[in-house]
Amino acid sequence: MFCHKCGTQNEEIARFCRACGRQLKNDSFVNNPYKKVVLVNCGRNKLNVIKEIRMLTGAGLAEAKNLSEHTPSTLTENITEAEAMQIKNTFEAIGATIEIR
Ligand SMILES: [Zn+2]
């Protein structure tokens, strides 16, 4: 199962994250399996973030720029936690801050 803290995929039976040691719980997953990805902050490299938003959402430049400037903004929703974590990792790799709700 996914670690909520660091996003590492652990074995389904794992009780603690093998990367960060956090106790794994799937309560929130059971209660609400559909997540949304919220951009909280673009970080230093806003142009890269805008580029990623466009790749992720298919948005035009103006729309992607708008999302990057009016944070917190929802990038995508009604996706699985696994998909949300992948997106979070992609954006955090370029310095953005992402929240999964
Ligand atoms: Zn972890």
Image: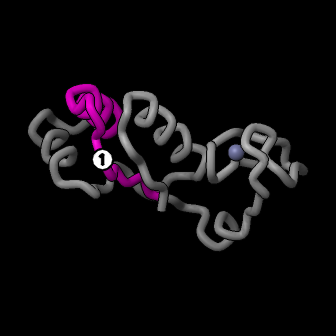
Residue drawn at x 41%, y 48% as measured from the top left? 98
Q: Position of residue 43 (x, y in %)?
A: 30, 38
Residue 36 lies left or right of residue 8; in this view the side is left
Residue drawn at x 50%, y 52% as measured from the top left? 79
53 in the magenta segment: yes
Residue furthest to the bottom: 31
Give the residue at mark 1: 41
Quadrant in the rendering for residue 50: top left
* Within-10-Å neighbours for mark 1: few <14, some 14–19, many 20+: many
Magenta residues, as a range?
36-57
User: Which is more toward the observer, 45 or 64?
Assistant: 45
Residue 83 lies left or right of residue 22; in this view the side is left
Q: Quadrant of ligand 1?
A: top right
Quadrant in the rendering for residue 45: top left
Q: Secondary structure at mark 1?
A: strand
4 in the magenta segment: no
Picture colour scheme: one colour
Residue 6 lies left or right of residue 59; in this view the side is right
User: Which is more toward the observer, 56 or 28?
Assistant: 28
Question: Relative to 94, is 63 above or below?
Answer: below
Residue drawn at x 76%, y 62% as measured from the top left? 25
Q: Position of residue 22 (x, y in %)?
A: 75, 53
Quadrant in the rendering for residue 15: bottom right
**Mark 1 close to ligand 1, CB under 8 Å:** no
| Total numbered circles | 1
Task: Name the amino acid, label 1.
Answer: Asn
Residue drawn at x 59%, y 52% as measured from the top left? 81
Residue furthest to the right: 13
Q: Position of residue 100 (x, y in %)?
A: 48, 56
Residue 23 lies left or right of residue 35; in this view the side is right
